[in-house]
Image (tube, grey):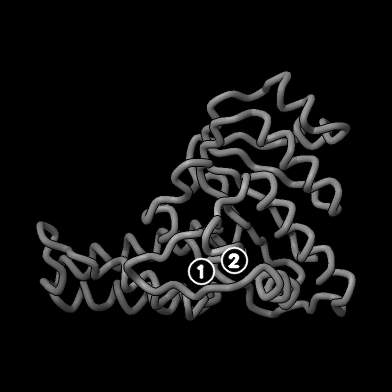
Amino acid sequence: MPPLRIVLVNPSHPGNIGAAARAMKNMGLEHLYLVDPQSFPSAEATARASGADDLLARARCTDTLEAALSGCALVIGASARNRSLPVPMLDPRACAELVMQQPAETGVAVVFGRERTGLTNEELDRCHYLVRIPANAKYPSLNLAAAVQVITYELRMARAAALPAVQSRHRFATAEEMELFYQHLQETLIAIDFLDADNPRQLMRRLRRLFARARPNQNEVNILRGILTAARQRGR
């Protein structure tokens, strides 16, 4: 399986962190990232981990989602809500199949949001895809650890059925490389008077969605940034 991390954003209940770690260990996953957890380390988390406390001991805590996604070239956000801008949507099985199709060196993150409110639109801007568990429409709310269990089960089943991951000559651009590109793009669009910094509306979010669908590799991002640099120099 390509390197995969489970990312929990701002979890409020330490018991859910422990139960998520247990779900991961059940399915053979090891890399847990916690973004600004409200209470961790915690005895409750350790108790709910039920023997997966080694995952908790190795869990990486970060202040920001950006830091938790460092090195990842495929980011999949878990969401139960429709969003104003269309984002490619997967069910858990399709999500797992997509992960297994990635080149062997591709860093992958599956990101779960807050227990009450999920992921913000800004956090979803960093995702290439969304995954939604097809629960009962009349009662769609899943416990955080239960959602992690469903996704990690499908990942394990896909891994068992998959051929070895291929090696790729050109790596996909990582999350931080894309953020630098988006910053460069926004600055250039403002400089050439295409984007009004005081009234940006949804332009940058729509452009993010465009490039997230394309998933450029590192070489392609370098070409795009070269074009942006040349455009700014020509406009001086």
Q: Are marks 2 and 1 in contact (CB under 8 Å)?
A: yes
Residue 62 located left or right of residue 190: right
Quadrant where the C terminus sits is: bottom left
Q: Can you identify the residue that label 2 sits on?
A: 74
> In front here: 161 or 70?
161
Whether residue 73 is visible: no
202 above or below 5?
below
- Residue extending furthest toward the top: 43
Cα separation between marks 2 and 1: 7 Å
Q: Determine the residue positioned at 37% across, 75% down.
A: 226
- Residue extending furthest toward the front: 138
Residue 4 is marked as none
Q: Earlier in the sequence, mark 2 or mark 1?
A: 2
**Of helix, strand and loop, which one carries label 2?**
strand
Residue 128 is marked as 1
Amino acid found under the numbered disc labelled 1: His
Give the x, y percent position of residue 62.
Answer: 56, 36
